[in-house]
Image (spheres, rainbow, N blue to C red):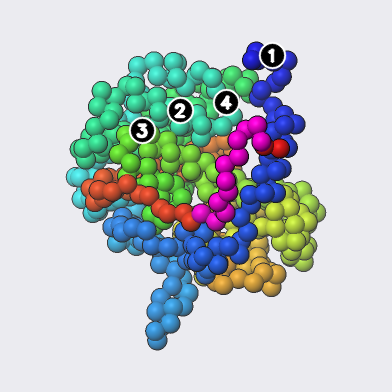
């Protein structure tokens, strides 16, 4: 049968719309079915707690404690390899050092490095911070698009072709591949944006080389900005953001994806691309973009940003699906695990205020602070919730990125620049400890029907 070339096959046709409506009508599984068959939908029980699917030494989240035999919420804690993240941050902030490289070492090797070990590790990463010859010209500058996560994933998959040992899953080789990607992710992300900015937005094209002596955060700002300049506070706050996003308990969607895909025996590049695909989702890595967009709408809507009655009215309108995207959510509030507080947000908040003062954006920070104070109470009044609600790190990170003049298109890739550290640690842990492919079970609730010959179907 000849193809009808008059049809736009990139568009949704009326036939496809009909099929889609029929599917939604005939095949949507009712929520009560999950209760009937005791199925933990989304690997969460009826109380919203994650179902245990593995063991890890890499990180731990604490959101509750046992008191007199009863589980009660507590202030949130996050541990990297057993070390409290708040103590890690206090350590490098007090000593006026950049901390991301130290956090990467801890996550990968399970212990805090000594001064000589850390210096050697920083030199190792600097040596890996170089793309193959002509990679920028032949890969990154070709077919630029607005989705930097797709651009990043394409670059990762293409690196497979440049690796003579791409399919070698020995721990030594996977560690080498992981270190290279940790070093290269800032370049792949920023260069991808520069290509988009030039070819799509008609801006000047500039490709800065990284500087070996600079930290990951410093290099990211250096290669992003036309003049390569940044303040010390800017670099230190970006470094802090990278540390706080580097890993989170192992049960998040992208890290679980890394475990699942790694368990199949596939190569490092494919596993990382799969994790990137997960992180790209707006329910995961794109959450801080929604926070920024929500606040932009709030600032346009409220004539007086200090009027707390008006702020409260706007927040209630959000929950009633009457404002912003009408999704019924106050973005940046609440977390799947934490209840009373997100320790990452607590650490971040003070430095966000410092940056707001440097950037002359104190009025906006005051608006964020007001929402952070009012929203938990309003959500508690408007919603039946089984645990507390507090600002999460996404509440602040998008505001920080906007103050750093980072383009919105890079918000999620910068998350990936950080989280590749945790993904790499989990991939290695899966390879070391697991011998079976991860294969969950689904229960079929479809009634069996007889096959009907084609000529007898209506």
Query: Where is mark 1, residue-wise?
Result: 5
Report the quarter where the C terminus lies. top right
State the image coordinates of residue 250 (x, y, percent, origin top left): 38, 54
Image point (55%, 51%), residue name: 448
Image point (37%, 42%), residue name: 261
Image point (70%, 49%), residue name: 25
Report the quarter where the N terminus lies. top right
* Labelled pair 3, 4 in contact (Cβ < 8 Å): no
Earlier residue among tags 2 and 3 = 2
Query: Where is mark 2, residue-wise?
Result: 154
Which element type, helix, strand or loop, lies under badge 3? Answer: helix
Query: Where is mark 4, residue-wise?
Result: 145
Earlier residue among tags 2 and 4 = 4
Magenta span of residues = 444-456
State the image coordinates of residue 303 (x, y, percent, origin top left): 80, 54
Image point (32%, 36%), residue name: 266
* Labelled pair 2, 3 in contact (Cβ < 8 Å): no
Can residue 165 be seen in the rendering of this structure? yes
Q: Quadrant of residue 134?
A: top left
Closer to us: 180 or 367 = 180
Pick out the residue farthest to the bottom: 68
| Spatial separation of the CA atoms under disc 2 and disc 4 | 11 Å
Q: Nearer the viewer, mark 2 or mark 4?
A: 2
Closer to us: 273 or 18 = 18
């Amino acid at each position: 049968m000849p193809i009808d070339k008059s049809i736009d096959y990139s568009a949704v046709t009326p036939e496809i719309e009909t099929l889609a409506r029929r599917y939604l009508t005939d095949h949507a599984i009712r929520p009560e079915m999950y209760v009937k068959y005791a199925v933990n939908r989304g690997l969460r029980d009826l109380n919203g707690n994650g179902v245990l699917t593995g063991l890890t030494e890499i990180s731990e989240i604490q959101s509750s404690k046992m008191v007199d035999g009863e589980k009660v919420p507590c202030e949130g804690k996050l541990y990297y390899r057993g070390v409290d993240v708040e103590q890690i941050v206090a350590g490098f902030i007090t000593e006026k050092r950049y901390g991301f490289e130290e956090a990467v070492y801890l996550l990968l090797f399970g212990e805090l490095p000594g001064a000589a070990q850390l210096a050697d590790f920083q030199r190792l990463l600097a040596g890996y911070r170089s793309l193959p010859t002509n990679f920028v010209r032949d890969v990154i500058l070709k077919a630029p698009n607005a989705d930097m996560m797709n651009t990043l994933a394409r670059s990762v998959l293409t690196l497979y072709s440049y690796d003579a040992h791409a399919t070698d899953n020995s721990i030594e080789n996977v560690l080498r591949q992981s270190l290279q990607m940790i070093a290269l992710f800032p370049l792949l992300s920023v260069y991808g944006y520069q290509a988009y900015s030039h070819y799509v937005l008609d801006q000047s094209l500039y490709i800065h080389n990284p500087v070996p002596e600079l930290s990951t955060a410093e290099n990211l700002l250096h290669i992003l900005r036309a003049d390569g300049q940044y303040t010390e506070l800017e670099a230190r706050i970006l470094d802090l953001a990278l540390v706080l996003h580097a890993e989170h308990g192992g049960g998040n969607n992208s890290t679980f994806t890394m475990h699942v895909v790694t368990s199949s025996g596939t190569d490092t590049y494919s596993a990382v691309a799969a994790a990137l695909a997960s992180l790209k989702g707006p329910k995961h890595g794109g959450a801080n973009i929604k926070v920024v967009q929500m606040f932009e709408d709030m600032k346009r809507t409220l004539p007086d940003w200090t009027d707390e009655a008006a702020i409260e009215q706007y927040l209630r309108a959000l929950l009633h699906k009457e404002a912003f995207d009408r999704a019924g959510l106050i973005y940046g509030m609440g977390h799947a695990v934490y209840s009373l507080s997100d320790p990452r947000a607590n650490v971040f908040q003070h430095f966000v205020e410092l940056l707001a003062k440097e950037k002359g954006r104190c009025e906006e920070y005051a608006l964020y602070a007001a929402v952070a104070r009012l929203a938990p109470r309003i959500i508690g009044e408007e919603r039946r919730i089984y645990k507390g609600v507090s600002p999460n790190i996404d509440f602040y990170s998008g505001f920080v990125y906007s103050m750093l003049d980072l383009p919105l298109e890079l918000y999620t890739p910068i998350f990936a620049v950080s989280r590749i550290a945790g993904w790499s640690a989990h991939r290695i842990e899966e390879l070391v400890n697991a011998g079976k492919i991860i294969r969950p079970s689904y229960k079929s609730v479809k009634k069996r029907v007889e096959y009907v010959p084609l000529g007898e179907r209506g």
